Every structure is written in structure tokens, then in C-alpha cells.
Amino acid sequence: MELRGCMPDAVSYSTITSRYCQVGELRKVLKLIEEMQVKGLKPNPFTYNGIILLLCKTDKVAEAERVLREMISKGIAPDSVVYTMLIDGFCKFGNVSAAYRLFDEMQKRKISPDFITYTAVICGLCRSGKVMEADKLFHDMVCKLLVPDEVTYTALIDGYCKEGKVDAANELLHEMCRKGLELNIYTYNSLVNGPCKAGNIDQAVKLMKDMEVAGFHPDAITWTTLMDGYCKSREMDKAHELLPQIPDGGLQPIVVTFNGLMNGFCMSGMLQDGEKLLKWMLEKGIMPNASTYNSLMKQYCIRNNMHATTELYKGMCAKGVGPDAKAYNIMIKGHCKARNMKEAWFLLKDMVGKGFSPTTSSYNALIKGFYKRKKFSKANQLFEKMRSEGLVADREIYKHIC
């Protein structure tokens, strides 16, 4: 345009930026905004809206709010769509306080939130465990004649089920059905979770059967929820039987459930089953985390099998899973118990170098181990370090010091 002597105006820039926003070209959008500012052109509401929506879609919610503030400072009024996108973005990142602040702000600006806005806040509150606040907002929404949908109901049902309030969840379920709203896989998974949390596994199994009758096949979340319920009830054999039922794919976000199963096996002395579970997880492409390995390492250390502990530690590191503070403390105490003070000292140095701190029991184990090996200098050094951190040594250690 400029080559032909036509200077683009704000409308031209707005049209181009809108196109770039639609295809997700954030860099090009920002570059055009800079050009507009250099030429003294002001972005119009459509330009600002497009940028904010694009930033929210690319998970840059804090930057999106900064654009909102710039927009308001220039006297351009945002609409409900912009506020809803920002609220939803903050809720997905767990920043419910920021979402609530914007929710209040839009109402003060006489911008009425619609059912999508309400649902975004309700979902955020339920994910943050603030179910009573979500319920209050739900009733406020209904009083304003806004109609909640399946997503709104499922969010509240899930929130109540996570708190073990199965009766409250069932009331919402019946209300949902009376209004002709269809249950989906997410609703059923939430309903299965409720009885599992309350220790009523039989009811959870019945719900799974109802789910299949309704035409929904249990997914990875359904099976692992039930498995977690069995683990909490210490029915490890039944939990183990469910493993072949779990479909491939989508398992990584729920590795915490497998950690529950691993911990259950180890606490019940079923170490071989724990080893098989780790192998199964790796075969299925489910990446274990430090907690997965910690349960096994702790049992190896209790059985004084430091060779197996070391091999597991090497395998853990080879998979790119870094040991956490608990892993280091488990191994240090295990090596001290086996009188492998050289290895324990190396692990201590390594953990401190990574910013982790030994626990009181780890310090006690190290000091006692070095005293037994007549390494008094290291023992005294650790004792002073322990005291400087405000930790109290065992009485037995004070006898040696005094």
C-alpha cells in the first residue's frame, strides 16, 4: 500500500492484525502494533480484543491482562468476551483470586457475565477445592436466570466428589437429569471418584456398570480412580487385577495413581508386585517420577539390600528422573544402616549441592555411622551443622559429644 502512495490507517492495521490473530501469528501482530504506535495510530477495540484473545490462547494470561490495562487506560471499554477469556485463562493456571478479581471488576463496569463466564469461575473454584464458593456462585447464576450446562454441573459434581460429599453430588446429578442434560464421560468419572474417596468401592463398581449401559466405555481415568480406591482400602490384589483393563494412552497425567498402587504394594510387603508394576509402567510409556522409585528404594533399604537400591537409583537417573530430597534421605539412611559411609557421604554432598537439606533422622544416622567408624572429625562437623540448622540430635549422640 505504502509503495503505491496509500498510507494504511487504523482500520487497515486492525484488519491485518485480526487475520494474524486468527492464525496465531503473535510476533507479527506485536510488530504491527509497534508500527502503528510509530505512525501515531491508535489500535481500536477489535485490535485489542484480538491480541488479548490470542495471548490467552497461547497461555500468556499475565501479558493479556497487561494489554487489558493498556486498553482501559486509553478509554477503550473491553467486552464480556475479553473478560471471560482472561478469567478462564487464570482459572486454568490455578490463579482463582485473579479470576475472581476480574469477575468482580467486569460487574463494576456494568458488564454482565454470561453463563460461560460463571462456568469458568465455578470450574476454577472447584479445581482449587473451594466448592462452597462455587456452589454459592452457581445459585447466584441461576437467580440471574442464566442456565447452567453439562460443564457447569460436572464441575460442581466433581468438586463435591473430591471432598467425599457423595449425597450433594447425587442431588446435582438428579437435577441435571431432570433438566434433560446428558451425562458425559467426565461426569461419570467424577461420580466414580466420589464413592472411591468415601471407601464405598461397591457403589463405584455399580456406577461403572451404569456408565457402560449408557454407552460410555471406562477410560484410563475411570480405571485408575477405581484402582486408587482399592489401594486406599488395602485391597491390593483387586487393584493389581485392574492393570490389564487400563487402555493405552493418556496415562501420564495420572502417574500419581500408580504411585498410590506402588506405595500400597511396598507397604504390604508385596515387593515383587511393586517391581512388576514399575516394569509395566515403563513398557506402557508411563514415566515414573521420584515418588514411584522412592517407595521401592525405601523397602530395599529396610531389607538392607543396598545393591538393589543402587541399581534402582542408577535406572532412575538413566531415565532422566532426578532424585528428590526424600530419595536422598532414604538412600543416606540405608547406606548408614549398611555401614557404607563413603556412599552416604557422597550422597550427602550431592544432595546439598542440589539445594536439598538432610532431615533430622538422616543427620542422626550419618553422625552415628561416622562415630562407629571412628571418623570423629566428620561426625562433629555434621553435629555442628545440624545444630546450626536448629535440628536436635538423638540423646545417644550427645553422650559421644560430651
Image: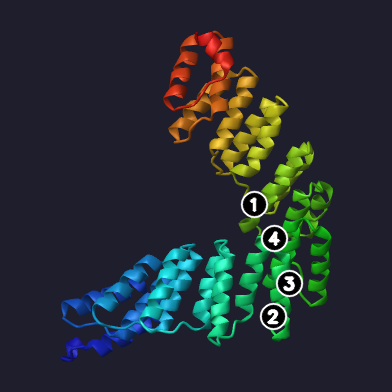
Q: Nearer the viewer, mark 4 or mark 1?
A: 4
Q: Quadrant of residue 336?
A: top right
**Pointer 2 and pointer 3: residues touching (CB < 8 Å)?**
no
C-alpha span from label 2 to label 3: 10 Å
**Pointer 3 and pointer 4: residues touching (CB < 8 Å)?**
no
Q: Residue at x 57, y 19 (%)?
A: 394
Q: Nearer the viewer, residue 199 or 286?
A: 199
Q: Position of residue 286 (x, y in %)?
A: 65, 53
Q: Amino acid at mark 1?
A: Val
Q: Nearer the viewer, residue 213 or 7?
A: 213
- In the image, residue 185 sits, relative to residue 145, either above or below, namely above
Circle 4 Cα neighbour tier, 10 Å, few/some/many (<14 / 14–19 / ≥20) = some
Circle 2 Cα neighbour tier, 10 Å, few/some/many (<14 / 14–19 / ≥20) = some
C-alpha span from label 3 to label 1: 26 Å
Q: Nearer the viewer, residue 240 or 235?
A: 235
Location of mark 2 (residue):
176
C-alpha span from label 3 to label 4: 11 Å
Secondary structure type for disc 4: loop
- Position of 345 with respect to 271 (left or right) is left
Secondary structure type for disc 3: helix
Location of mark 3 (residue):
170
Q: Nearer the viewer, mark 1 or mark 2?
A: 2
Q: Which mark is residue 256?
A: 1
Secondary structure type for disc 2: helix
Which one is earlier in the sequence, the residue at label 3 or at label 4?
4
C-alpha span from label 1 to label 2: 31 Å
**Pointer 1 and pointer 2: residues touching (CB < 8 Å)?**
no
Location of mark 4 (residue):
164
Q: How is the model colour-coded? A: rainbow
